[in-house]
Image (tube, grey):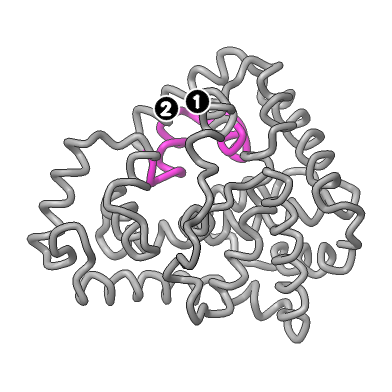
Amino acid sequence: MEYDDVIAAAFEPTPDGVVAGPTQDPSPARRFRDAIEPIAMHSVWSRATNEAQADLGLNFMTGYVMGRAALLGEPEPGVVSASFAVFEPAMVQGAYEAARSVCDRDELWATRTAATVASLTKALDEADVSAAADALETAVKAAPMAGRPLFSGLLSQEWPSDPVGRLWRACELAREHRGDSHVAVCVANGLDPIEMNILTELWVGMPLGSYSATRAWSPDAMATTTAAMQKKGWLDGDQLTDEGRTFRDSIEASTDALEQPIIDSLGGSFDSIVSDLETWSQRCIDAKAFPPNVFKRAAG
């Protein structure tokens, strides 16, 4: 999967007037999550980072998988797929094995960090991010680690020294913290990976199967899960029922609650920091370093 092919598929603009469901009357935790997404994911979508990783022998998917797996050190493939949760396991394990056969973990980590910080610095166009980086670093360093492998692995890595690098690292950490929390909530509620994907894609307003397919699930697997969800009363055809939407709302509320320590840490600066993050994230989108589609931003 090459970068230009991914860009061609993922960078379709949002139709006029279309909004993602969670962006309407968002909770503070959801507003924060959406504000940091393009910054946190700069390492995934930046052309500069992808080109630097291509020089190491990685394509878009192997770079993405190895980049996140590197947070865990040098894990076995099964640990990687378990931590990623919502992706088809064989795809993740195969991408990870392919990546580590051509690329040293430490070399990738150094390349990924240097290229991403340089790209993000250019995108933010000399914005003064120091105060926000300080506040976010304090918040994520105090966040609970238990049961959060990707967050905890990333927290153990050396921080970039410059303000833009620290801003990116703090946003990346907050994103991994929420992702780990969300997976824990979903598993506690008995959801399997395809159910997690389908509930999210329909909840934010995406067509059935469109988001799940990007996680490498086959049409047959998605069809089997869809039928099971219809029997549970969560789906009516290709739409969420009231019961299904209420259930997914409860998943979101529980995830938000687990992220409240980060929100609380920002205190009275929360609104101003989130406003700045929203501005800087838009600059990432304008720089074509994150997809412009509102559904992609809301779904992760």
Q: Residues within 10 Å of mark 2 (few under 14, many from 20)?
A: many
Residue drawn at x 66%, y 25% is 105
Task: Report the magenta stretch's main SS.
Answer: helix
Residue 130: quarter of image: bottom right
Q: How many callouts does the rendering have?
A: 2
Secondary structure beneath disc 2? Answer: helix
Residue drawn at x 31%, y 48% is 193
Residue flagged by tag 1: what amino acid is it?
A: Tyr
Residue drawn at x 34%, y 28% is 90
Residue drawn at x 66%, y 20% is 54
Q: Residue 79's x, y, as percent? A: 45, 36
Side of 297 where 194 appears, left or right: left
Q: Which residues are magenta?
A: 67-87
Q: Is residue 158 above or below residue 80?
A: below
Side of 254 where 31 appears, left or right: right
Q: Based on the picture, tell me whether residue 185 belongs to the magenta stretch.
A: no
Which of these two is toward me, 145 or 4?
4
Side of 145 where 276 appears, left or right: right
Answer whether labels 2 and 1 touch (C-beta < 8 Å). yes
Q: Residue 107's x, y, as percent? A: 74, 23
Residue flagged by tag 2: what amino acid is it?
A: Gln
Residue 204: quarter of image: bottom left
Q: Residue furthest left?
A: 231
Q: Residue 270's x, y, as percent? A: 72, 79
Q: CA distance from mark 2 to mark 1?
A: 5 Å
Residue 215: quarter of image: top left
Which numbered circle lies on residue 93? Answer: 2
Residue at mark 1? 96
